[in-house]
Structure formats: structure tokens, C-alpha cells
Amino acid sequence: MALIVQKYGGTSVANTERIKNVAARVARHRENGDRIVVVVSAMSGVTDGLIKMARDLMPIPTEREMDMLLATGEQTTIALAAMALHSLGVPAISLTGAQAGIVTDGVHTKAKILNITPKQVHAMLDGGHVVIVAGFQGQTSEGHITTLGRGGSDLTAIALTAALKADLCQIYTDVDGVYTADPRVIPNAVKLDEIAYDEMLELAGAGAKVMQLRSVEFAKKFGVIFEVRSSLNDNPGTIVKEETRSMEDVVIRGVSLDKNQAKLTVVGVPDRPGVAAGIFKALAGAAINVDMIVQNVSHGAAKPVTDVSFTVDKADLLKAQKVIQGLKPEIGYRELLTNESIGKLSIVGVGMRSHSGIAARLFETLAGQEINIDMISTSEIKVSVVIDLAKAEAAARAVHAAFLE
Ligand code: ASP
Ligand code: MG
């Protein structure tokens, strides 16, 4: 008799029909004799709708009240899911995050889980119930309702799996698992049977968003093995776990394309100590996340100058532009160029640790497509390039074909 945590995301509980399907699946598992804890998200679109209403009232809504508001999304789903199970004759009970014993810090809208005391969950399981827990929410030790950041139901499921020492954690979503690439862009992409935490983190950071990043980090830290799978069929999904030796036999696990970045180039920056520090400190001070950075070789013997390029989220471009313009009197650069028409293409795989020549093969593939590389960055298990957005999808297909087909 296994203890299973199943998490159903917003699209899996999008309407009462889908909630009935979830209930039927849970009932089937229960007939096998398994004990089941279900974590649900808000019905898809509900959280966005609540945020929109809040912003109609206040451009920057008060954070405590925002959490009080957003927590209602998941609370709706747990009650409906419990009813759907009751209608099938399955004993089930819904619990809020607080009732499930999830205690967080007081940082509203992005709270961290401090500890979980799932006394009620255990008691209800022992009583033969399916326990349905509201994802994405917790409570401070003073009793204020908090939320865990967008996509936080994943974190609830992973953390509960650890706290309950459950045998299995299944993350149900609207795709069959983690793919070698986005199947909408690359029709030849295939579902992976397994992937290492680090690969999943790098792919997510590279723009392939299957799960909340923080929850994968949490799973890695606590060694929670989980499966990402579809709630729309019975196909096996992708197992996410610690890297094993055999995983290194595969050169590349996946290709991802991030079309959400913009590039800024500060041209003619004086090449002297402290200039880069000045630029990136100012950006950090404005809470702008910088991804790739490239500094050119400097030129000009007497008063050497250089160019510094970096990428930020497109949403942060205007803010970043303002910050850099504000530094002009202090630094005295020549001009600031921006480019929104870029794509960041990445290949990821723990196999890079033991295979050589992978970057060269990537560059060769791009050269074969007459694609110019604008920026390059690497980590131990990832190589990323910035290229022209217009050619990015074709490039991703060529790279996928070269490494994964
Ligand atoms: N409902 C929350 C959101 O939309 C949490 C989740 O779906 O995981 O971000
Ligand atoms: Mg979600």
C-alpha cells in the first residue's frame, strides 16, 4: 500500500468536467489500495483573473490582502474536487494549506515554507480519506495566509511529499512529460523517460517552463523523486531525479529556445576598474535580472574603451535602459543600443561533463544554416547562444536534428 501525492495543475482542473476526470483517476488509484494526497491549483485563469481585479483597485495591491485573495482560487478547487469524489462514493476531505500544517515565513506573495506538520493529513489518511490540499498557500506562525509565488502548487506537492515521506509524487499537467524540446516549435521532439534535476533546472532557466523552478530546486535539495505526466491520458511521464552514471551516456538531453530576452549594448565604455561593477550594481539595485554578459576586447591605446553587452527579460528592457542612461554622466560611454529581436538557444545535458566538442558541434550546425552567433555563454552542462530572432526557430530545429534525431 503506497502513499502517493498527486498534484493537478490549473488546466487539469479547468472546469467541472475535468475535475470529474481527476476524481475518477484518484478513485482508480484508491481501488488499488493506495493512500492518496491530492494537491490542486486554482482552475486555469482564476489566479490571473483575481490579480486583474486587485489591480483595478490598486496598481500595486497590498500584499497581505493579495494573498488572502489569491488563496481563494485553490480553496474553490479543493472543495469542488472533494465533492466530485463524494459523488463517486469516495470518502475525501479538503484542507487549506494552513490546515495541512504548512507554515511559511511572512514574505507575502512569495513566502518560503519553514516547516510542515501534517498532523491532520495523517489523521484523515488513517481514517480512510483521500486528502485534498490547496496548493500554493500556507500560513505564518501568527496565522496570516501566505502564497508561495506563481506556480507554487508544484512546491506544495514536492514539500508535502518530503514531509509525509510519501512513496511517489506525480505532477499531472496538460503535456505528457518533459520533452527534448518544445513540440510546438520542434515537431520531432520526443518525451524523455527521465531527466536529472540539474538538467530540468537549466532547461527551465532557458525558457522551457514545465514546472516552477523553485520546486525543482526544493526537490533536488531534499531528494524528492517525482514524475511529470498528463492528466488527459494514461501514458507514463518523465521521472525527475538525481543524476545517475548512465544519464551521461546521452550527450544532450534537450534544446530550448527563449524568445523573451532583449539585448543591451553599452558602446564605448572606458576600460578601467570598477566600470562593470558600476553598471551591474545599478541594474541589481533596480531588481533587474541579468542573464548573459559579454565584454569585448578593448581598443584605443591611450584611452582604451570597450563594449559591454548583456541580456535581460524583455519586460525589464525599458527599466534597464533608464538605469543605463542614468549612468551616462558618471561613466561617460558613447551610446546605448538595444535589440529585442533576439532568441537564446540552449543545449543542455549532464553528458557534457564527459563528452568533448559539443560546443564546436553546435557552432558548426549554426554555421551550416548561415546563422550568425551574437553572444555565447556556457556552464558545466549547458551551452547557450544568442541569435537573430527571425532565424531562431529554424536554428532550434537544425540543432535538435543534429543532436537528438
Ligand atoms: N494558482 C497559482 C498560479 O496560478 C499557483 C499554481 O497554479 O501553481 O500561479
Ligand atoms: Mg500552475
Image: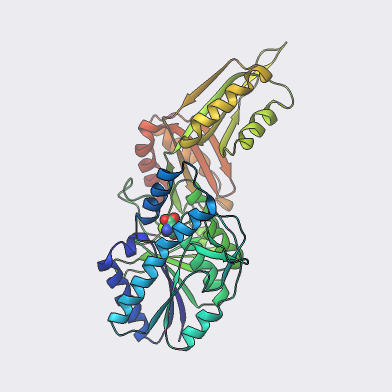
Q: Give whichever of 209, 199 is nearer the camera.
A: 209
Q: Give whichever of 250, 51 is nearer the camera.
A: 51
Q: How far across and down, in percent of the image, does residue 191 sit?
A: 37, 59
In the drawing, does residue 231 fall left or right of residue 312? left
In the drawing, does residue 239 fall left or right of residue 219? left
Q: Which quarter of the frame holds ligand 2?
A: bottom left
Q: Residue furthest left?
A: 17
Q: Residue furthest front?
A: 57
Q: How far across and down, in percent of the image, does residue 174 sit?
A: 33, 60
- Establish if 368 lies above or below 125: above
In the drawing, does residue 125 fall left or right of residue 277? left
**Which quadrant holds residue 239?**
bottom left
Q: How far across and down, in percent of the image, does residue 263 sit?
A: 50, 30
- Establish if 321 lies above or below 58: above
Picture residue at 61% right of the left edge, 58% below the top = 106
Query: How many marks on residues?
Result: 0
- Quadrant of the image containing the N terminus: bottom left
- Establish if 173 lies above or below 164: above
Q: Give whichever of 309, 352 is nearer the camera.
A: 309
Picture residue at 50% right of the left edge, 43% below the top = 60
In the drawing, does residue 261 fall left or right of residue 24? right
Q: Is residue 295 visible?
A: yes
Q: How far across and down, in percent of the image, does residue 351 sit?
A: 53, 54
